Image (cartoon, rainbow, N blue to C red):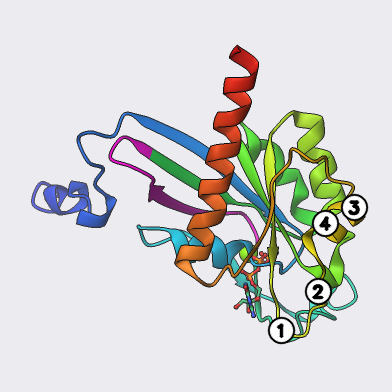
Amino acid sequence: MDFKDCEPALMEPLSEERLPHTASAAVKIVVVGGFGVGKTTLVGSVSEIRPLTTEETMTQAGVGVDDRAWVERKTATTVAMDFGRISISDELILYLFGTPGQQRFWFLWNGLFEGALGAVVLVDTRRLEVSFDVMGRLEERGVPFVVAVNAFPGAPVYALQELRTALDLPKAVPLLSCDARRRDSSRDVLMTLMHYLHSLVVTETS
Ligand SMILES: Nc1nc2c(ncn2[C@@H]2O[C@H](COP(=O)(O)OP(=O)(O)OP(=O)(O)O)[C@@H](O)[C@H]2O)c(=O)[nH]1
Ligand SMILES: [Mg+2]
């Protein structure tokens, strides 16, 4: 079989995959949080390329292992990672990596965190405790992060100051609400992270 004819078709990137010629900086951002807090949803809503997801159908094997009490309508879960991309400006491109939320996949985080400049921690107010481990791991690795509270229907609504106290979050760490299903809201979260990362660099160098 002659493969020559199909090569150009395989090599040709989709128009959505092309980067502008002006792009000069690419930054890796990880999106983390407990099981079912909306990581795949956030990466998907904000990505300008068709996001890569590694979702698998949840089966009976997960019963009693995964805490499905709060996400009973959830039928799929991320088993490796989500991947998306967003251009912040003509020069700056963010590559987004969503991690799996279930503890049995946490060993994958090591690779996913490699080279990450910052992180978004997604939080569900019905299950704040699942975020403690996540934030602890980011602190250990020295990865700066912002915390975004993803609003689910029926979830308790707390003042951000109350949540900051409950999460034992230093004043400097940005905390905001979001709706991961909405592109503008997810973009706001990423812009908040970028401003925060910028402020850290300015503080370090001044
Ligand atoms: N109401 C509401 N539902 C949301 C929001 N974000 C996500 N969801 C829903 O919550 C469910 C879980 O979202 P996912 O994006 O799969 O969560 P995840 O964190 O990637 O889950 P794992 O990969 O299994 O850890 C899905 O059914 C979403 O449609 C939100 O902001 N509001
Ligand atoms: Mg997911």
Helix or strand or loop: what does disc 3 sit on? helix
The answer as to whether callout 1 falls within 8 Å of ligand 1 is yes
Q: Earlier in the sequence, mark 1 or mark 4?
A: 1
Q: Residue at x 55, y 63 (%)?
A: 42
Q: Quadrant of residue 79?
A: bottom right
What's the residue type where badge 3 is placed? Thr
Label 3 belongs to which residue?
A: 165
Helix or strand or loop: what does disc 1 sit on? loop
Q: Which mark is residue 33?
A: none
Q: Earlier in the sequence, mark 4 or mark 2?
A: 2
What's the residue type where badge 1 is placed? Pro
Q: Is residue 146 depicted above or below 63 in this figure?
A: above
Helix or strand or loop: what does disc 4 sit on? helix
Q: Residues within 10 Å of mark 4 (few under 14, many from 20)?
A: few
- Separation of marks 4 and 2 at Cα, in angstroms: 35 Å
- Residue range (magenta): 78-92
What's the residue type where badge 2 is placed? Gly
Q: Is residue 67 depicted above or below 145 in this figure?
A: below
Label 2 belongs to which residue?
A: 62
Label 4 belongs to which residue?
A: 161
Q: Is residue 191 depicted above or below 160 in this figure?
A: above
Q: Which mark is residue 153?
A: 1
Q: Nearer the viewer, mark 1 or mark 2?
A: 1
What's the residue type where badge 4 is placed? Gln
Q: Residues within 10 Å of mark 3 (few under 14, many from 20)?
A: few
| Residue 87 part of the magenta-drawn span | yes
Helix or strand or loop: what does disc 2 sit on? helix
Q: Residues within 10 Å of mark 2 (few under 14, many from 20)?
A: few
